[in-house]
Amino acid sequence: MRHLTRTMALAALTALAAPAHADGTVEVLHWWTSGGEAKAVGELKSAFDAQGGTWVDSPIAGGGGDAAMTALRARVVAGNPPTAVQLKGPGIQEWANEGALRDVQDVADAEHWDDVLPPVLADIMKFDGKYVAAPVNIHRVDWLWASPEALATAGVEAMPTTWEEFNAAADKLMAAGITPLAHGGQPWQDATVFEVVVLGIGGADFYRQALVDLDDAALRSDTMVAAFDQLRKLRGYVDPNFSGRDWNLATAMVMRGEAGFQIMGDWAKGEFLAAGMTPGEDFLCAPAPGQGYILNADSFTFFNVSGEENIKGQKVLASLIMSPEFQKTFNLAKGSIPARTDVALDDFDICAQRSHGDLLAARDAGTLVPSMAHEMAIPRSVRGEFLDLVTQFINSDMGSAEAAAQLADAVQRAM
Ligand code: BGC
């Protein structure tokens, strides 16, 4: 009896002495390694640590997450999945379908996630009616970032609102000896610019037919040929050293005024902010030419792992990610807006306010479309065909009609 009491007292003492493990452990696989991204994920780590949990960081560098997804596959095949993984769109469904994910429906029920998430996002996070992912944000892809200094030097007076205006502004920058478009030649960046142009040239219905429904006629259409024509134009506005350049280095060219524009999602804003720059003053943001809104949301999934400590960690992380305080702090650093609809945006900047206003308007007008390049729209295998073809187009002198035909053929083969 005495022995038992002592054991219990010891156990209580041990528990007190180890608050670091009170709230679980997570190993988090993500690809947030640029300046702005690291700052944002640092917020998540600090919040998790503050709850007494243990965070094991597993960053896999590589914008857009392609390297991270390869690493994830290897970990799962080896029977050693991370506890939490940055994953999105159809990828969530694919992994859930393989039986790899644990649901966090108990957390979602207790915290009423259904009441605070836009249905379009909630649907992506669920498998078989249960939440298997927690969304952190809403990123907009179709943005134009610009250096006010470069534009002024070249005599460009306003942010372009059509592709003709964009081309005219780019010609002026070129004449002034400034690189018109900062771009990094990596397949996901090529595809990002491509989808922005597809929306801009074809509109939201066409975007949906071609990049979401994978309609053969749309892929082969004159509209697609026209989109490739504009992409060819953009290729001419890029500097010779673009191959392999990381996206944040392209953003840095705009920061330094070496380049006029960058076409990139609003994670680029995270870079400007991390460098201490203010939107509307040190850099400019405007939607890329066209009508609509390309949606990209980041989320975390919870893989099937054993051990109470790990399962606890998953629940704590899910709850933390969805807390209004965290959604605010994180998104202020990341460049995105909160996934929750009930977080006030008063402290957010003009680009975020614009994103939010345009998101609601696009939802009402039916022009809200999911990002193909950022894995919100189609299976990874088909997305891979888009990336290959678009990159091949950008790095060759392939004609636009040829590109549209080859793209349609490749998509057909992949389906
Ligand atoms: C992710 C962003 C990330 C960007 C660049 C996108 O696919 O959604 O969170 O910042 O890739 O790495």
Image: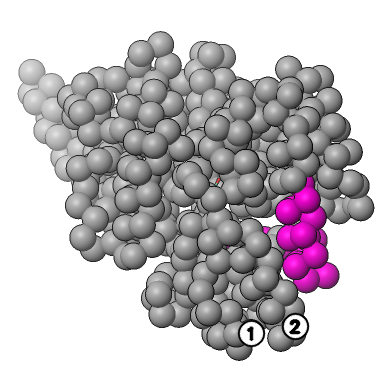
Q: Is mark 2 within 8 Å of ligand 1?
A: no
Q: Secondary structure at mark 1?
A: helix
Q: Measured from the top left, where is residue 308 in percent x and y? A: 33, 24
Q: Amino acid at mark 1?
A: Ala
Q: Is residue 155 above or below residue 325?
A: below
Task: Judge whether residue 200 can be spotted in this image.
Answer: yes
Separation of residues labelled 1 and 2 (CA atoms): 8 Å
Range of the magenta residues? 228-252
158 displayed left or right of 11: right
Q: Measured from the top left, where is residue 264 in percent x and y? A: 57, 57
Q: Which residue matches tag 2?
A: 175
Q: Is mark 1 within 8 Å of ligand 1?
A: no
Asked whether the residues under the numbered discs 1 and 2 touch, taking CB atoms below 8 Å apart as contact, a structural biologist would say yes
Residue at x-position 35% and y-position 22%: 131
Q: Which residue matches tag 1?
A: 154
Report crowding for label 2: few under 14, some 14 to 19, many 20 or more residues within 10 A (C-alpha): few
